[in-house]
Amino acid sequence: MIQKIEDLKSKCDTSMDELTQSKIDFEREKALKDQKLAFQEQRIKEYHEQMSNSIERYEERLKSEKEEASKTLQERIARIQQEKENVETKYEQKRKALKELEKNVQQSQSQFEREKAVQNEKYENLERS
């Protein structure tokens, strides 16, 4: 019976040792998995930060390019409007010069017609005399 108790005690110790070893293994695996989970969560956090930074840089660059394009467009519009004003001014000057020229041509033509009429009248008077 003592032998049986000793055997049972030995089995109990062995079982306790196995249980303790299982607990130790379980705790070690749990600690490794917790560590791995924490590492993955940290990586996810870093990836989110990188993504946020990339998005922020992209939005800043997009804003900058929009502002630059807008500025360039405004400069082109201002330059084209200035050119338009210059062309309109030149057109008005040429139009006024043409009107003046037409006026001078008309005056010259009227004077020529009067002189012609006077010359014709003198010629007719000479023929009559």
Image (cartoon, rainbow, N blue to C red):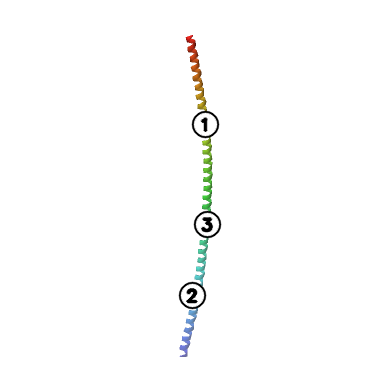
Observer-nearest residue: 95 or 16?
Answer: 95
For mark 3, give the secondary structure.
helix
Q: Alpha carbon of mark 1 to alpha carbon of mark 2: how far? A: 103 Å
Question: In this picture, is 2 found above or below 26?
Answer: below
Specify the amino acid type for callout 3: Glu
Return the residue at label 1: 96
For mark 2, give the secondary structure.
helix
What residue sits 48% from the left and 86% below the top?
9
- Rendering coords of residue 86 (x, y %): 53, 37
Q: CB atoms at circles 1 and 2 under 8 Å apart? A: no
Q: Quadrant of the N terminus?
A: bottom left
| Sequence-wise first label, 3 or 2 | 2
- Report the disc number at residue 31: none
Return the residue at label 3: 56
- Rendering coords of residue 90 (x, y %): 53, 34
Q: Residues within 10 Å of mark 2 (few under 14, many from 20)?
A: few
What residue sits 51% from the left and 57% below the top?
55
Return the residue at label 2: 26
Between circles 1 and 3, the one closer to the viewer is 1
Specify the amino acid type for callout 2: Phe
| Sequence-wise first label, 1 or 2 | 2
Q: Alpha carbon of mark 1 to alpha carbon of mark 3: how far? A: 59 Å
Observer-nearest residue: 98 or 126?
Answer: 126
